[in-house]
Image: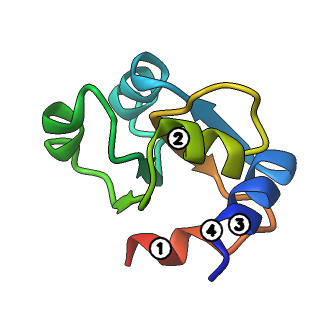
Amino acid sequence: MDIAKALKVAIESGKVRFGVKETEKYVNKKEVKLIVVSTTCPEMESVMNYKVPLYKFEGNGHELGIACGKPFNVSIVSIIDPGNSGILALGE
């Protein structure tokens, strides 16, 4: 699966949140279906404790930001609604 394409489709057609604080907020609401985390996520240990499927993106925050089509670093992406993407298959 092309992770960059799947992320862009999820962002365009579903519901996605960026960042540790947003992820934590939606994890507590039990709405997150998948977490995509970069290798440079500053809160990696706490993210590993969430009871949510996790996909380790093989790149840093800058590369994850580019994959998401964002002009900034992205350390973590939480997928709430995958929309028309097949991104949830990454968490299996």
Q: Residue at x 33, y 60 (%)?
A: 53
Residues 81 and 35: in front is 35
- Residue picked out by circle 2: 77
Evaluate if marks 2 and 1 touch, with contact meaning CB atoms under 8 Å apart.
no
Residue 90, numbered label: 1
Residue 25 found in image quarter:
top left
- Residue picked out by circle 4: 3
Q: Is residue 78 left or right of residue 45?
A: right
> Mark 4 or mark 2, which has the lower sequence index?
4
Q: Is residue 42 left or right of residue 38?
A: left
User: Residue 50's spot in the image, x, y percent?
Assistant: 22, 42
Amino acid type, label 3:
Ala
- Dot 1 lies on which element? helix
Amino acid type, label 2:
Val
User: Residue 71's spot in the image, x, y percent?
Assistant: 76, 28
Evaluate if marks 3 and 1 touch, with contact meaning CB atoms under 8 Å apart.
yes
Rendered-image quadrant of the N terminus: bottom right
Q: Residue at x 57, y 28 (%)?
A: 73
Residues 55 and 26: in front is 55
Evaluate if marks 1 and 4 touch, with contact meaning CB atoms under 8 Å apart.
yes
Q: Residue at x 77, y 46 (%)?
A: 11
- Dot 4 lies on which element? helix
Residue 88 found in image quarter:
bottom right
Q: CA distance from mark 2 to mark 1?
A: 13 Å
- Dot 2 lies on which element? strand
- Residue picked out by circle 3: 6
Q: How many marks?
A: 4
